[in-house]
Amino acid sequence: MSDASQHPPTGPAADWARSFGSVAAAYDRGRPSYPREAAVWLVGKDPVTVLELGAGTGKLTAGLVDLGHDVHATDPDSAMLDILRRDLPDVRTSVASAEEIPAADRSVDVVVCAQSFHWFDLDRALPEIARVLRPGGRLALVWNQRDERIPWVRRLGALIGTQEQLRDPAGPLVQSALFGFVEDATFRFWQTVDRESIQDLVLSRSNIAVLDEPTRAAKLAEVLEFYDDYGRGMDGMQLPYTACCFRAAVIDQQPRDGAAVAAADVADESAGNASTSTEEPEVSDGTDTDMLLIDFR
């Protein structure tokens, strides 16, 4: 995922958000994919229509296609999508942002975002996502995060940066009135990194991609020294990750049809008439069950 919207983040984050196209090949080689069980939890086993926002080079897309889903992959960066198209030529793609989705109202079963939701202008993206979801459809989010409880992984994070280690990645979804209860699940897995791929992993990071060439080269030298210090050589290192997954069903925001509105008006009128009745209400003496169940604290 690269550029976020017509109203992108400001400051250094804006440069980071737009940096991925320049390192698309390194991103594809160095970043981990997603566990199959995570893809199943996010989207399901039965084939459905999926819109993927911020699909990048197709790290999750490939798994969704393998499960039989009909995927429309979008990303605002054409360089990232070029790699996805190369590897998955049968997948429909669009150069588009999450804030202006090229899909009709109520046209998809699941919208999925892998490693991208935090780049969106959510004031605009969440209503767009709700618009394209069918009734009962859901938004599914996933982030791969390094398990930095392990000391050497924490040391690597200190070298290359930890801005993607989000503490509450689905917070805006929890707070949105457009979606219901947010479920979550985690899936642990390992990525083998060797002396070559660890360099791609570093180069693919937005905070590294925006550095000037001498500073970037110095950072790579630091990481290689770190790798060589562990003496793993051609055997590589097992880098532990947790796929942090979230999903929530859309709350139907469509206006009711005429019949439903008329029925509601009748019900409201009846309620209004009942409230104007002159009949004296029954007064409880406090011993009936309903009164006793009231907590007056």
Image: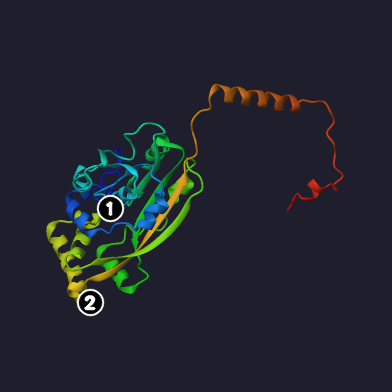
Left or right: 213 as drawn, with respect to 295: left
Say which element carries label 2.
Answer: loop
Say which element carries label 1.
Answer: loop
Q: Is residue 285 visible?
A: yes
* Residue 73 position in % (x across, y down): 29, 42
* Residue 11 position in % (x across, y down): 28, 48
**Kind of residue sitting beneath label 2:** Tyr
User: Height in image: 140 above or below 103?
Assistant: below
**Kind of residue sitting beneath label 1:** Lys
Name the N-terminal-most of marks 2 and 1: 1
Neighbour class for label 2 at 10 Å: few (<14), some, many (≥20)?
few
Q: Nearer the viewer, residue 30 or 47?
A: 47
Image mark for residue 230: 2
Q: Which residue is mark 1?
A: 59
* Residue 39 position in % (x across, y down): 37, 53
* Residue 158 position in % (x across, y down): 28, 67
Residue appearing at x 21%, y 65% in the figure: 198
Q: Identify the image's colour scheme: rainbow, by chain, secondary structure or one colour.
A: rainbow
User: Height in image: 207 above or below 99?
Assistant: below
- Mark 2 → mark 1, Cα distance in angstroms: 28 Å
Q: Nearer the viewer, residue 99 or 216?
A: 99
Image mark for residue 123: none
